[in-house]
Image (spheres, helix red, strand yellow):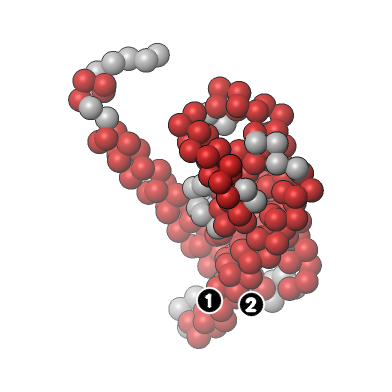
């Protein structure tokens, strides 16, 4: 965590881009949190608005298209892939396929704003052989809303922190706090999700070893 913080502090644009990539690879760096962080750093004049927007926007589109390409390459076999079978189960794939058949591109447009479903939807868009140009246009339009929302919230929050400079004066410390909160939120989400899934299993199923 410290290394990531120092990377953002010394090379903020590269750091934000790499965090987006690492989040796509499954590490606990949620996209929304990174956008909040970019808005926060902009408010504190650590990064400039236009370069920050270009880096974050291109990073979002590249990582989204990467997931789409993986889904298109493996098709329905994606649920058997070791890296992605924890992200997309056969049951979830079937449900999302039905959504795509009914709503089409709207699933991508609105789905990218849903934490926990975003990666699944991009994978299924590829599985469903959605035309890549159509995917990029819809995703690029939706990403503008995402950046405006979360980046704007981070910017407003960053300006509010100016009033707290008596207590917090080091931007690096603030960044560490934000990243720690993000990591804690992800771990709590996974913990409660695992407990919920376990509690739904019948008692006799828990005793069966599927390994």
- Where residue 7 appears, as percent x and y from the top left, is 67, 55
Using the image, determine if residue 197 lies above or below residue 170: above
Residue drawn at the location 45% of the way across and 31% of the way down: 91
Q: Is residue 187 left or right of residue 200?
A: right
Q: Which quadrant is home to the C terminus?
A: top left
Neighbor class of circle 2 (other Cα within 10 Å; few <14, some 14-19, many 20+) is many
Using the image, determine if residue 36 lies above or below residue 71: below
Is there CB contact under 8 Å for labels 2 and 1? yes
Q: Nearer the viewer, residue 158 or 64?
A: 64
Q: Nearer the viewer, residue 180 or 3?
A: 180
Residue drawn at the location 52% of the way across and 79% of the way down: 161
Asked if one can make out residue 159 in the rendered structure from this viewpoint, the answer is yes
Residue drawn at the location 52% of the way across and 34% of the way down: 93
Indicate the quadrant where residue 52 lies.
bottom right
Residue drawn at the location 48% of the way across and 38% of the way down: 95
Q: Tell me the element at label 2.
A: helix
What residue is pinned by disc 2? 43
Q: Is residue 62 left or right of residue 200?
A: right
Q: Nearer the viewer, residue 122 or 2?
A: 122
What residue is pinned by disc 1? 157
Q: What's the CA distance linking mark 2 and mark 1?
A: 8 Å
Q: Tell me the element at label 1.
A: helix
Asked if one can make out residue 17 in the rendered structure from this viewpoint, the answer is no
Indicate the quadrant where residue 34 lies.
bottom right
The numbered disc on residue 27 is none
């Amino acid at each position: 965590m410290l290394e990531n913080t120092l990377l953002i502090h010394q090379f903020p644009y590269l750091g934000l881009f790499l965090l987006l990539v690492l989040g796509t690879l499954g590490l606990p760096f949620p996209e929304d949190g990174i956008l909040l962080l970019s808005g926060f750093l902009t408010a504190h004049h650590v990064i400039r608005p236009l370069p920050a927007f270009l880096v974050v926007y291109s990073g979002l589109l590249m990582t989204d298209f990467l997931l789409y390409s993986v889904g298109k390459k493996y098709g329905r076999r994606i649920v058997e892939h070791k890296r992605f079978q924890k992200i997309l189960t056969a049951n979830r794939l079937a449900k999302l396929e039905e959504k795509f058949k009914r709503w089409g591109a709207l699933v991508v447009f609105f789905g990218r704003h849903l934490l926990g479903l975003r990666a699944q939807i991009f994978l299924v868009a590829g599985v469903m052989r959605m035309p890549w140009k159509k995917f990029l246009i819809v995703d690029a339009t939706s990403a503008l809303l995402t950046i405006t929302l979360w980046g704007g919230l981070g910017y407003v929050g960053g300006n509010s922190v100016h009033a707290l400079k008596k207590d917090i004066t080091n931007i690096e410390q603030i960044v560490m706090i934000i990243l720690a909160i993000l990591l804690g939120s992800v771990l709590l989400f996974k913990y409660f999700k695992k407990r919920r899934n376990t509690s739904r299993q019948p008692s006799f199923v828990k005793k069966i070893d599927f390994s």
